[in-house]
Image: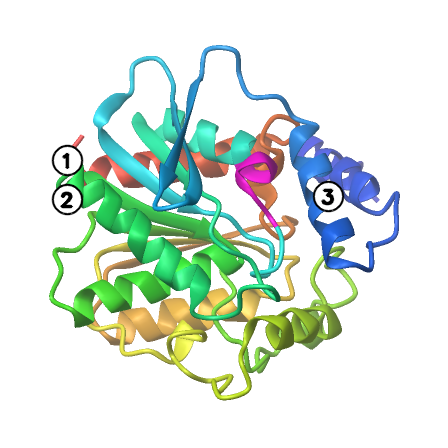
Amino acid sequence: MSAPSKGESEIAAIRAMLGAKPRPVGWQERRQRIEEVGAATPVAADVALETVSIGGIDAEWSIAPGSDPGRVLLFFHGGGYCSGSILSHRALVTEAGRAAEVRTLAVNYRLAPEHPFPAALDDALAAWRFLRQAGVAAHDIVLGGDSAGGGITLSLLCRLRDTGDALPACGWLISPWTDLTLSGETLASKDAVDPLIHRAYLAELRDAYLPEDVDQNDPRVSPLFADLAGLPPLLIQVGSDETLLSDATRLAAAAGAADVAVTLEIWPHMIHAWPLWNARLAAGRAALAEAGAFMRRHMGR
């Protein structure tokens, strides 16, 4: 048997770190844990941060040296609609901005169960309008998100198209959760290798997020089932060891069938939202470099 590669050793260390403690039970405990994990990687010293309020929604600008302040990555964090924050995803968002050579705007949208659907999507739309009212052209904006934030990104793209708004340059989806009916086959086939995301956990998050009168297959919450025609180019990045792999592959097929320019990257041995650990994971840095090149290309850089 051959020795594990450096990449496999690095992801094994991340797996060990994630498995060192059991998953917390309460919402507040879960929110604290994801922030602890995210804050373990400090932001690079050369990144400038600035807080901003968007109609009462906390948000944060970041910019690395050499980036264009007139172009923006608007990013929505993951966490199953119930946890996650600017802090938990700061190391990911700031380095994505560096790779794309743009400013970033990360948004602390409202969380379920205190604020169920459509609160998160409404806050995402408010952030988009904030940028547009500030004079940022639509073609100078990229929408991005991981996991549930990927679902928000896709739902917002569909909403902008349906209302006749100018669309952003492109969309960037990391390990997107696109199907709240939980019908993807890899929820079962990848269950043994995914250290983070399992069907029962997703069902708990979904039930906390969805009001009783919203169907699980409503395209506003399960954008896999939306009409995707007319959307801007999409980059979908997903790990081969994710239970949500089918959410990504089925989305890529649906987008392609709707004549959307879509790029699907399946990263071997990677787990859910692996670019979060880019400081310790070469594959995380490489994924951000690929995403940065994609964003620069579609913004005409």
Determine crowd level at label 2: few under 14, some 14-19, many 20+ residues with C-alpha closer than 10 A. Answer: some
Please say if 222 is above or below 98: below
Q: How far apart, in angstroms, are the residues tagged by discs 3 and 1?
A: 39 Å
Label 1 amino acid?
Gly
Query: Where does residue 210 sit, x and y in percent of width and height?
Result: 54, 77
Q: Residues within 10 Å of mark 3 (few under 14, many from 20)?
A: some
Q: Where is residue 88 in the image (x, y as percent from the top left)?
A: 61, 38
Q: Where is residue 102 in the image (x, y as percent from the top left)?
A: 29, 28
Q: Of callouts 1 and 2, which one flags the residue occurring earlier in the amino acid sequence?
A: 2
Badge 3 or badge 2: first in the primary sequence: 3
181 magenta-colored: no
Amino acid on which the number 3 mark rests in the picture:
Gln
What SS does tag 2 mark? Answer: helix
Provide the major secondary structure of the magenta segment.
helix
Q: Look at the image and tell me whether residue 221 can be seen.
A: yes
Report the Cα–Cα distance between label 1 and label 2: 9 Å
Is residue 230 shown to the viewer in this render? Answer: no
Q: Identify the residue under disc 1.
A: 300
Q: In this view, does 246 lie to the left or right of 27?
A: left
- The kind of secondary structure element at disc 3 is helix
Q: Is 87 one of the magenta-colored residues?
A: yes
In this rendering, which labeled residue sits more in front, label 1 or label 2? Answer: 2
Read off the residue under disc 3: 32
Q: Mark 2 points at which residue?
A: 139
Residue drawn at the location 58% of the way across and 31% of the way down: 278
Does the residue at mark 1 contact the one at mark 2 (Cβ under 8 Å)?
Answer: yes
Residue range (magenta): 84-89
Q: Which of 199 and 108 is in front in this view?
A: 108
Q: Which of marks 3 and 1 is in front?
A: 3
